[in-house]
Amino acid sequence: MADMHRALGELNQMDDLAAQDSPIHRLHPLAKLLVTLGYIAAVVSFGKYALSGVLVMALYPALLFSLSGIPVTVCFRKLRVVLPLVMAVGLFNPFFDRAPMLAVGGVGVSGGVISMLTLMLKGVLCLMASFLLIATTGIDALCAALRMLRVPGMLVTLLLLTYRYVGVMTGELAVMTDAYRLRAPGQRGIHHSAWGSFLGQLLLRSMDRAGELFASMQLRGFHGEFYYAGAWPFGAADAAWLMLGLGACVLLRLVDVAALLGGAVMG
């Protein structure tokens, strides 16, 4: 019961984060989307041993966390389920690539360890960039930016309604869980004998709720397309952020900034 209400609160918190006011929140959603896509493309394009280059790419999320006022702890709390899965992708690399690449304090470090750390860091940075995009833009503005990029309206509408309906289904599930707990006090979880009827009731309630939502959308003039794509003017600050963001991604990808900084410090 508490888990359902907690999940619903976390979904609502994402809308609260997107409703905040900061220099990043005020940017045009299309500019933020393109910079995020460019950043993710730059991060994943690094080689499997380019750990120093990927480390430098952490400057982008660090800058956004600072400018947006969103705590880093909120990001990791929201991604606590996905992060372990992403970080587990490269766990077997040290077993397949055992050739030593460098020595740290007299201890040899294999290429598999380097590639594992690089792959993990890539996944974490991409997830952080995606989280910051949603947390500073909102799903409505993000879908508007996708339509500006000529993404098919059916796909955008499906994305928007799926995101919104997750909250509706979570609310329905919380109500049903509360009702079950009141009828079975002291019982931990839902008994396996009630799983079938519980899921059936959830399906029926979700179908009824979906029909009501669709009817209300039609009464408000919905005919398969959301007309929100022209609600945000693209200003000079947005163009500057787009050019600087994409330019920085290209620069950090093509120039070994870590080696330059190391040379400057050693020199």
Image (cartoon, grey):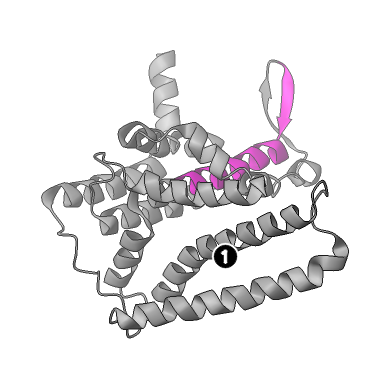
Residue closer to the observer: 40 or 148: 148
Query: x and y percent of residue 38 in the render?
Result: 37, 54
**Residue at image coords 73%, 25%:** 108
**Amino acid under disc 1:** Met
Label the magenta part by its dominant secondary structure: helix
Indicate left or right for 236 with 187 as reference. Answer: left
| Residue 70 in view | yes
Q: Secondary structure at mark 1?
A: helix
The C terminus: image quadrant: top left
Residue under label 1: 169
> How many marks are shown on the rendered structure?
1
| Residue 39 in view | no
Q: Is residue 113 magenta?
A: yes
Which residues fall within the magenta stretch?
Answer: 106-129
**Residue at image coords 74%, 68%:** 198
The outermost residue toward the front is 183
